[in-house]
Image: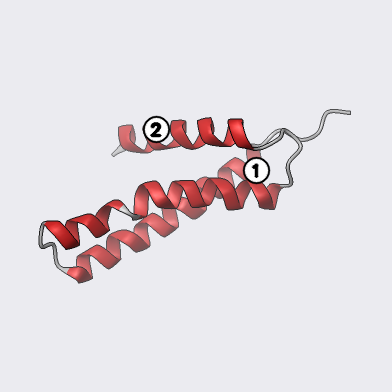
Amino acid sequence: MVVLVLVITLFVAYVAANTLAAASPAMHVFRVTGTIAFMAYGFAPILYGIWFGQPWGSVFKHVFDGVIYGLLTGAIFAWLWPAEIA
């Protein structure tokens, strides 16, 4: 799981670095990076429910975990995003 988190975070950082300016507001950084992270963590379990017959209760729990991971990832990126250099 740690490797998965690191790989997803690497891709979130790549997309954020290429789409957001260094002085972007923290809320904008949070929204963009949190959305990307949620898509990575939260969309995959839906496929298991559709194609592999995983119970939908379990799928919704995994999607909820994806929401939490997305919020945490977005918050960390917003906190550590570089501010405007004077």
In the rendered image, the vertical position of residue 24 relative to residue 53, given as above or below: above
**Residue 57 location (% of width, % of height):** 21, 71
In the rendered image, the vertical position of residue 85 relative to residue 69, given as above or below: above
Residue for badge 1:
79
**Residue 72 location (% of width, % of height):** 50, 50
Give the left or right position of residue 33, taking residue 20 as reference. Answer: left
Residue 80 sits in quarter? top right
Q: Secondary structure at mark 2?
A: helix
| Circle 2: residue type | Leu
Q: Residue at the right extreme?
A: 86
Q: Nearer the viewer, residue 5 or 47?
A: 47
**Residue 7 location (% of width, % of height):** 37, 32
Which quadrant: the C terminus? top right
Which quadrant: the N terminus? top left
Residue for badge 2:
6
| Circle 1: residue type | Trp
